[in-house]
Amino acid sequence: MRIIKLALISFLFFFVLLTIMSLFIPSHVRISRAINIASTNQKAMLLVEDTTEWRKWHPLFKESSIATVLGSNKVTWRTITKTDSLFVMSFQQENKEPVTNSWQLHRLASSDSTALQWYMDFQLKWYPWQKFGGLFYEKTYGTMMEQGLNDLKNAAQ
């Protein structure tokens, strides 16, 4: 009985300790990647804005259908903002928090190229497993975003 009581108290102590540590991790995570493209090239933004064209460049949609990629989960997306240099879209899987994807063109008058920036915003709850899991988003999504931007650059040429 003493061992069970000690195990329960130890488990509770470590859970509270992990929860307190996770409170120091931000609830908002932004992952960003950028690539230089030709400054006169508007095709890149057209490929981003048209979701039917995502099969040409987006790593999750290349050579597969959305049903295959996302399993049986229902996914909804909606456009939040759309201008000539900014496109913001929100994705939400069933029973999950929405993820905001944004693509923005940054033009410099003195430069011969334009930077296309893709960033993803995640809003995490206070749960310790979500906060600690958010620390690995950079590695997981960052690589995918780099690949997508390179493919987008090639598709836009």
Image (cartoon, rainbow, N blue to C red):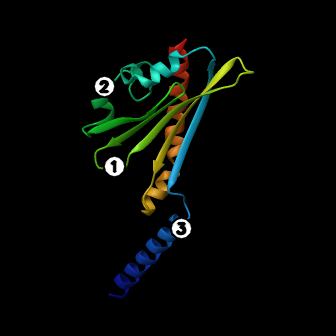
What's the distance in space between the residues labelled 2 and 1, CA to CA?
20 Å
Residue 80 x %, y % = 41, 37
Instruction: Identify the amino acid type marked 3.
Output: Met
Q: Is residue 127 left or right of residue 39?
A: left
Label 2 residue SS? loop
Q: Which residue bears the numbered disc 3?
A: 21
Residue 99 x %, y % = 42, 43
The residue sitting at the top extreme is 157
What's the distance in space between the residues labelled 1 and 3, CA to CA?
23 Å
| Mark 2–mark 1 CB contact (< 8 Å) | no
Q: Decide which of 34, 15 is in the foreground and name it.
A: 34
Instruction: Identify the amino acid type marked 1.
Output: Lys
Quarter of the figure that contains the C terminus? top right
Dot 3 alpha-carbon crowd within 10 angstroms: few under 14, some 14 to 19, many 20 or more: few
Q: Decide which of 76, 135 is in the foreground and name it.
A: 76
Q: Which residue bears the numbered disc 2?
A: 65
Dot 2 alpha-carbon crowd within 10 angstroms: few under 14, some 14 to 19, many 20 or more: few
Residue at 70% in and 17% down: 112
Q: Earlier in the sequence, mark 1 or mark 3?
A: 3
Q: Decide which of 28, 15 is in the foreground and name it.
A: 28
- Visible in this render: residue 4? yes
Instruction: Identify the amino acid type marked 2.
Output: Ser
Quarter of the figure that contains the N terminus? bottom left
Residue at 64% in and 22% down: 114
Dot 1 alpha-carbon crowd within 10 angstroms: few under 14, some 14 to 19, many 20 or more: few
What's the distance in space between the residues labelled 3 and 2, CA to CA?
40 Å
Q: Is residue 147 above or below residue 23?
A: above
Mark number, residue 96: 1
The residue sitting at the right extreme is 110
The residue sitting at the front extreme is 83
Mark number, residue 124: none
Residue 156 x %, y % = 52, 15
